Image: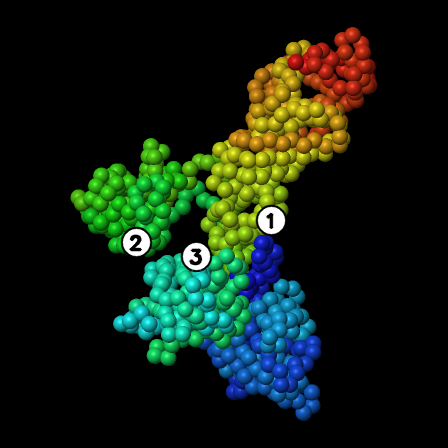
Amino acid sequence: MKKILLLLTALFVMGGVEMSAENRYLEITTNAVKENAWEWAVWYQLDTPLEAGKTYVLTMDAKCSEAYQMSFWPTNTEEGGQTTYTGYSIGTEWTACTCEFTPNDALNRLSWNFGSLNGTLRFDNIKLVEKGKTENLINDGAFDGALPSNWGNDGWNSPQYSIKETESVPVGRCLKITTNSVKENAWEWAIWYKLDTPLEEGETYVLTMKAKCSEAYQMSFWPNGGGVTLYTGYSITTEWSDCSCTFKANGALDRLTWNFGSLQGELCFDDIRLVKQGESDNLINDGSFDGTLVSNWGNDGWNKPEYAIVIDYPAVVATKPQAEVLLEKSMFKGWTGPEPDATISTNSPFWNAVEDFENVGAGAVVFGNSNVGYKEYADLSKYSGMKIYGTGDNLRILMNRESDGGPLTEVRVTPTESGTFLDFSSYEFVHLNAIKVINEANSTNITKITLVDPSVKQEVDYVFTGDMKEGVMTASATAALADASAKVIDVTGMLGTDLTLTSANPNAIFIANAGTLSNTKNVQIDNTIANLVITDKKPLADLTGVTATAATYTRSMTNNFGTICLPYAVTSTESVKYYTIDNLDGDVLTLKEETELAAGTPAIVEKVSGESITAEGSGALVAAGAPTGNLELIGTFEEKTVLAADYAGKNIYAIKNNQFVQGLNSITVPAFRAYFTADASAEANLRLAFGDEATAIDSLTGEKSIKAIYSVSGASQASLQKGMNIVEFTDGSVKKVMVK
């Protein structure tokens, strides 16, 4: 669906999201009621006058501090110029407004007049087009930038107006249908869409749409035409969900009719598509309701439900995850069965728990329903436990019922002010059917019940919720994507498909549902990353427990040797070799060449050829390791400042310019490198021929560079070889290096 944006300096596009830092709109305020409409006014001066006799369509999103009938007067400001008098209604919530008019003159100014208003107006997404065309004649009607100079107000009264911004706006255009009573027959409330061309008899068609209803509802969908009706339908839930209906035309059907006589409430339709099976052309004009409601829509004469384009869909919000989350009614679902792999059958099962937790009496239901149905529960399997805060007598925690009236697990917990913890670790899964107060209780006061997130090794920095396709990208979400320190962003709670999100940290992992993101790298679905691409020196999360189908790390190297630490296993090649430290004995440092370097193992890397190294691999991902021994090599996946004071009795080292350097106070090690610690009693001034760039080294001891490398027989060598190597430095000193 194409989107209309409220309060947003961003553009949502198929396959990607462009974002700005703010959600913006024009706010106009008045402080008194005037006698005439024109005594409060704002106007927009058009760059080019409208042409008399042509039809134009104004659309915008607006809200007002009170329900208001807006006077909209396009006018010709030249001497003797005419005015076209028209208008439209604005609600107290964001409303999709439309006004169609035919100028009676060369109108060059759009004037909004609201003299009877003492309050606040908000305008956004203003669009003026010639009917049948798409070019917007308004400059920056979304108020993304500075207010265009086209805006002004009349001199006799000057209402205040300026661009404002907000963080929370429901957006996304849809068709809202409202009924006010229950009818006897399905057809007594109906709305229809007249097709431009009848369907072909005998051909199969697929209707898809987004829909929601004020109650779970079985929709009657009856395509008809030429005296023939096809009776079919589909289910709608109380939350936005994808609906579909496949049918074979039994005649030249030219009208799609939705019948809902048994409904007293609200229906919302969006993204309506009707295609012939095997084809892609949508037979519905503007099924996303981006513009003015097309004339194909109508309702039956005997009963006419109200219908109009409105703004819905949740804004996109980013929050920091909490260790504890509230146990909420919305977690309680109807399921296909009690099994761990059961699926949701309804989002609103029977519920008769108390609403007020103060002085809850004996036998009262605190969560769920009194029936304790085996297909009605909150799936809490992902949490490590529950905490019950309050005072009073025991609660009965009823879980994992196997059948109606059948076996279940019952645990009794006494609430405390600091929270009593119920551990879930011993259960294969946790399906919370109900919480009740024991029958013998005097009274129980419950402050709150929370769920404790498991102490997972993969830490989440931000959790995104909202509709990615339709909702506004709020400032919180934009800021989260701009956070270069964010390593994991969870978007599994978002609606939408095939969108691209970009983090300021190129190594950020997006945890997503299948199909949500079109990102080609660093997307985790369940516990798998199809393509892990690591950018050098940028932070990466501990991905223990996650598997990479393919993984790549690239790094430019000016020197031949350095340190490395990666979350996946890598293999030595002709151009790149890996070494681990075997031991340090006196002046002999022994290295071990690794044909395959295990995941998370800090190592010394040798660039045998080229200007860079590329390390490819796959498999289980782990945290940065730290082997122990006389000489420790400790890896890191993010920049780390290492303090000498934290390593009592040891020296700390990094690598710079083809040699060990000691940090007397501290060293700063970039991501995907390693640093060394050695017993202070060991040789203090290690020197070895390998290269890297460590930053912010406070102090070095006796810097010198490599002059030459020799075999034990005295033959000159270009690089370290297996066996004993003699390394000569420019100051004349010599060290022995053993490579196993």
Question: Label 1 vs label 2: CA separation?
Answer: 38 Å
Say which residue appears at 55% left-offset and 57% top-offset. Answer: 473
Residue closest to the eye, 554 or 463: 554
Image position, residue 96 (x, y; %): 50, 71
- Amino acid type for the residue under numbered disc 3: Asp
Image coordinates for residue 467, horizontal then vertical, percent: 49, 56
Point out which mark residue 349 bears. Answer: 2
Furthest-bottom residue in this view: 80
From this viewpoint, is residue 137 visible? yes
Q: Earlier in the sequence, mark 3 or mark 2?
A: 3
Q: Secondary structure at mark 3?
A: strand
Residue 305: % across, % down: 38, 74
Query: 288 or 240: nearer the eye?
Result: 288
Image height of 154 relative to 604, above or below: below
Residue annotated with mark 3: 242
Residue 41 in sight: no
User: Mark 1 — residue?
Assistant: 502
Badge 1 vs badge 2, beta-carbon distance below 8 Å: no
**564 or 177: nearer the eye?**
177
Mark 1 or mark 3, whichever is nearer to me: 3
Labels 1 and 2: the sequence-earlier one: 2
In percent of the image, x 60 and y 19: which residue is there?
649
Amino acid residing under circle 1:
Thr
Badge 1 local density, few (<14 within 10 Å), some, or many (20+)?
some
Which residue is at the far front?
202
Tell me which label, 1 or 3, sits earlier in the chain.
Answer: 3
**Are dots 1 and 3 in contact, CB under 8 Å?**
no
